[in-house]
Amino acid sequence: VKVLKKSFYQKDPKEVAKSLLGKILVRRLGDKQLKAVIVETEAYYGREDPASRAALGAPKYCVEMLYGDIAKALVYMVHANWLFNIVAHEPGKAGAVLIRAVRPIEGIEEMTKHRKAKNVFDLTNGPGKLTRALAIDRSLNGVDVTSQESEVFFCEGIHSFKIASSHRIGVRKDLKEKLRFFIAEDPFVSR
DNA sequence: CGCCAGATTGACT
DNA sequence: GTCAATCTGGCGG
């Protein structure tokens, strides 16, 4: 497996969000591995972004991490759900990419144990759903995602698909720019 | 300590 | 489509 290098994350969050589509998310769980293809992401920036956790009132550690080292997992809770982000930005800047939906490809039975769903399409098609299915919580916060030894990391994946974009979902105050990206017509994208 | 918002979800009309 | 439950950290008293 080819693990994505740290330099992959040293770009504008918007670019990283796009490049992350089609890549493989690997969750190591003891001797098991859960794998999924990333099909939907969103980009967030620093204090200039009103929807960012760097905006006023957000947990302190989120702000610090958004401005800190790249290629680290950033996990925090919103509406009783853990949300999974990767810190990604250019040097001296701030930002992160939120993983909003994935397509399970390995360890589906294990995922079903963590989260019951009517069908496989409902298992990981939302930011809070996938963190439960993949057993991602606050304990993974700060983990380096460029090492195969880590609890979570990202690998090269599929390449031929069409990227679509839209405004970000659920955000009160969004920026003008479209910062949500997803694989067009993929059944695992959130609604 | 109580109140409130928030990058959500699931159940229901 | 609507709506309430869910948890955590920040903020005011």
Image: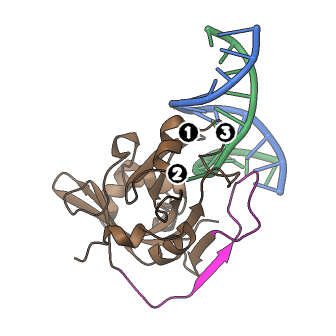
Chain colours: A brown, B green, C blue
Q: Residues within 10 Å of mark 2 (few under 14, many from 20)?
A: many
- Callout 1 touching callout 3 (CB < 8 Å): no
Marker count (numbered): 3
Disc 2: which residue: A128
Type of amino acid at the residue the image marks with label 1: Ala
Point 60% across, 53% down: residue? A46
User: Which residue is found at the position 26% from the left and 53% from the top?
Assistant: A151
Q: Is residue A96 above or below residue A186?
A: above
Amino acid bearing label 3:
Leu
Tell me the CA gap for discs 2 and 1: 8 Å
- Counting residues from the start of the chain, the first of labels 2 and 1 encountered is 1
Would you say A45 lies left or right of A169 here?
left
Label 2 with label 1: CB-CB less than 8 Å: yes
Viewer can see residue A116: no
- Asked if residue A99 can be seen in this view, the reply is yes
Q: Residue beneath label 3, please?
A: A56
Task: Give amino acid for label 2.
Answer: Gly
Please, which chain is the residue tagged with disc 1 on? Answer: A
- Is A168 in front, or is A184? A168
Task: State which region is magenta.
Answer: A157-179
Q: Which residue is mark 1?
A: A80
- Residue A55 in which image quadrant: top right
Say which label, 3 or 2, has the lower sequence index.
3
Q: Which mark is residue A49?
A: none
Q: Residues within 10 Å of mark 3 (few under 14, many from 20)?
A: few
